[in-house]
Image (cartoon, rainbow, N blue to C red):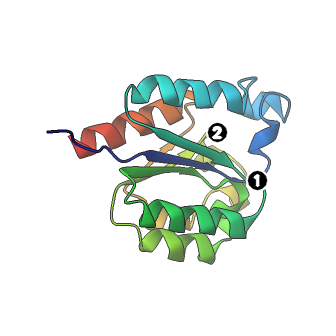
Amino acid sequence: MTTTVSAIHVLNGPNLNRLGTREPQVYGTTTLGDIEAACRDEAGDVAIVFRQSNSEGQLVDWIHEAIDARARGIVINPAAYSFTSVAIVDALKMFAGPIVEVHISNIHRREAIYQRSLVSTVATGVIAGLGGGGYRLAVRAILLAAA
């Protein structure tokens, strides 16, 4: 008997396509491509759907796709939308599986505007301040939740 294993959806918000060159003192020199490779490595045989958009509506559409695909889990770094997007929060509320919010920097040690994430109110867990390695931990957490 073959079991179909659903994918883990890793969704990235605005400006994360600039990782590696964007404020390296805050975000380091790891690129989004490096992070994608680490997620795929951590997931092993489990499929990863890895995406980045600077558009809030596109991220909402991808959350809907994850819902419809019955994704194993969602790893999301909504970036600036963490602090402003009720639309992303509402979409995530519809997802029945684990949601892990990831931030490369420790948002709680940053300026006040970065310290309160709306997305955290619906996330299963939050990983912040561990650099790109936080994504690997998020994928592992979803794999463990599904075990």
Q: Quadrant of residue 102?
A: top right
Q: Amino acid at mark 2?
A: Ser
The residue located at (73%, 28%) in the rendering is: 31
Q: Which residue matches tag 1?
A: 14
How crowded pointer 1 is (Cα within 10 Å; few <14, some 14-19, many 20+) is rated as some
Apparent side of residue 8 relative to residue 19 in the rendered image (left or right): left
Q: Position of residue 28 (x, y in %)?
A: 73, 26
Q: Position of residue 83 (x, y in %)?
A: 66, 65
Q: Earlier in the sequence, mark 2 or mark 1?
A: 1
How crowded pointer 2 is (Cα within 10 Å; few <14, some 14-19, many 20+) is rated as some
Q: Amino acid at mark 1?
A: Pro
Secondary element under disc 2, as helix, strand or loop, is: loop
Q: Is residue 97 above or below residue 130?
A: below
Alpha-carbon span between mark 2 and mark 1: 15 Å
**Rendered-image quadrant of the N terminus:** top left
Apparent side of residue 64 relative to residue 33 in the rendered image (left or right): left
Residue placed most toward the observer, 125 or 111: 125
Secondary element under disc 1, as helix, strand or loop, is: loop
The residue located at (85%, 29%) in the rendering is: 21
Residue at the left extreme? 1
Q: Quadrant of residue 98?
A: bottom left
Residue placed most toward the observer, 48 or 23: 48
Q: Which residue matches tag 2?
A: 105
**Rendered-image quadrant of the C terminus:** top left
Q: Nearer the viewer, mark 2 or mark 1?
A: 1
Q: Position of residue 11 (x, y in %)?
A: 59, 50
